[in-house]
Amino acid sequence: MNERSSVAELAESLRREVERYPEGRKLPSSRALMERHQVSPVTVSRAIAVLVAEGLVVSRPGAGVFRAAAFAAAPDSPAAPAARPGDLSWQEVALSADSGPRDLLAAPVFATLQVPPPGVIDLNGGYPHSSLLPERLLAAALARAGRRPGAWDRPPTDGLTELRGWFARDIGGHAGPISAGDVLITSGGQGGLTVAMRSLAAPGSPVLVESPTYSGILAVVRAAGLRPVPVPVDADGVRTDLLADAFEATRARVFVCQPLFQNPTGAVLSPARRAEVLRIARAAGAFVVEDDFARLLVHADAPALPRPLAADDRDGVVVHLRSLTKAASPNLRVGALTARGPALARLRATQVVDSFFVPRPLQEATLELVSDPGWARHLRTLGAELRDRRTAAVAALHRELPGVLGAHRPGGYHLWLRLPDGTDDAALVAAARRRGVQVTPGRPYHAAEPPAPNLRLSYAAADGPAQVAEGIHRLRTAYQESTG
């Protein structure tokens, strides 16, 4: 049982127990709760914190935890008077001038962030399982960061100079074309994408995107009032012959791509096409937004990685985006945009209006983390664990669902499955959920009608190779059920 489900179950058990207590009655000690429920001290502490936040109990340091007097008048208590619901229908009129319901734009993003309930295997999430995260390194980095002189002072709006320098070297190399002055620290990858889309393209204009592509890119593009135009991807990355045609037909000034371990196909842009992408974009007078989200998720058996497109660009064509959240923690929302000239000034202006700056303590902790010798060891361990999960996933797919898996690369965290023609991917996802496994339909990864039914399967969020294999076994059962 994972920590999240243990906390939820203990909190629910304590809620029922507290209902029988008179006001002010003291709950059993943490040690007694640990022994009774066979859980860790952390689980007890977090469950108590849930009840405190709900107002059911109060915690008095040194004395214990007591039933709160306000519990009897809680909103869902039988003794509480029923509140008359307000009339919210006016909001439909007020919001009707917008371009469309934002919840529809955000639905695929919500789906990838959804935490499955206990007993459901997560083959959907984009973040590695908690057991793969460097929690001790993060805790130590946060502790050291909090003691740094000036850690709580206001940071430079572009970000800490030392952290910007680290990103510049990590992206372009020590003698590369990128300096600290070319880097803007952002609130994670999604925040960086939002800043880039709102800065580089005028509302209503077309933006070229890979097809299929990460659903979060499509959500950001549409939320910015832009029009995504798909350019097909094959095993070698974006089709550069069609990219040139798309630029000519649309007069777009932005192309968003993921050259390394593309989400969802896993494709790596071939060397010949790398040069072509830069040449075509330069000829079109357009920017290439390079979402380098998976560089730190390279598997232990992968060949040497190609350099970022930004490392070979001296003309300011590439706006590079890098984030540490997937390799470190979903909560370490620190990334970097790299650009030059007026484009960087535009990015900076957009971010400062939106959010001022990324909190300094978070930047200080990030700098401590990447400067720790344990960071490199963590990345090697993560690469080995992802390799083992991928190997288990590939073997299970060949055994359980032969024929659905195409080419795959040793990097990233996902596989792109080609389902037989006529398969309803949404029905399959619903059937899989009933069978206790969470996967992602392929439709939200297309800016237009999908050419074929697909499924994206993530192996990073599962608790080990054995759970990956079990999840795929359940998926086969769901497939048989959904197809009759």
Image (cartoon, rainbow, N blue to C red):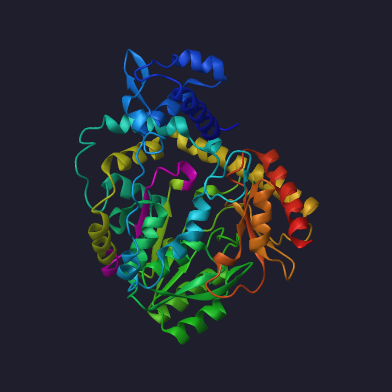
Q: Nearer the viewer, residue 49 or 163?
A: 49
Q: Position of residue 235 (x, y in %)?
A: 64, 67
Name the residue located 36 percent from the left edge and 34 percent from the top edge. 74
Left or right of 98 in this view: 452: right
Q: Position of residue 97 (x, y in %)?
A: 32, 74
Q: Is residue 116 depicted above or below 275 in this figure?
A: above
Q: Nearer the viewer, residue 245 or 341?
A: 245
Residue 162 visible within the image: yes
Q: Position of residue 242 (x, y in %)?
A: 55, 80
Left or right of 25 in this view: 151: left
Q: Nearer the viewer, residue 113 or 287?
A: 113
Residue 307 visible within the image: no
Q: Is residue 111 magenta?
A: no
Q: Position of residue 23 (x, y in %)?
A: 35, 20
Which region is colored magenta?
326-344
Tag count = 0
* Viewport quadrant of the C terminus: bottom right
Q: Quadrant of residue 286?
A: bottom left
Q: Quadrant of residue 93?
A: bottom left
Q: Is residue 427 depicted above or below 393 in this figure?
A: below
Q: Residue furthest bottom?
A: 249
* Viewport quadrant of the N terminus: top right
Name the residue located 78 percent from the left edge and 57 percent from the top edge. 480
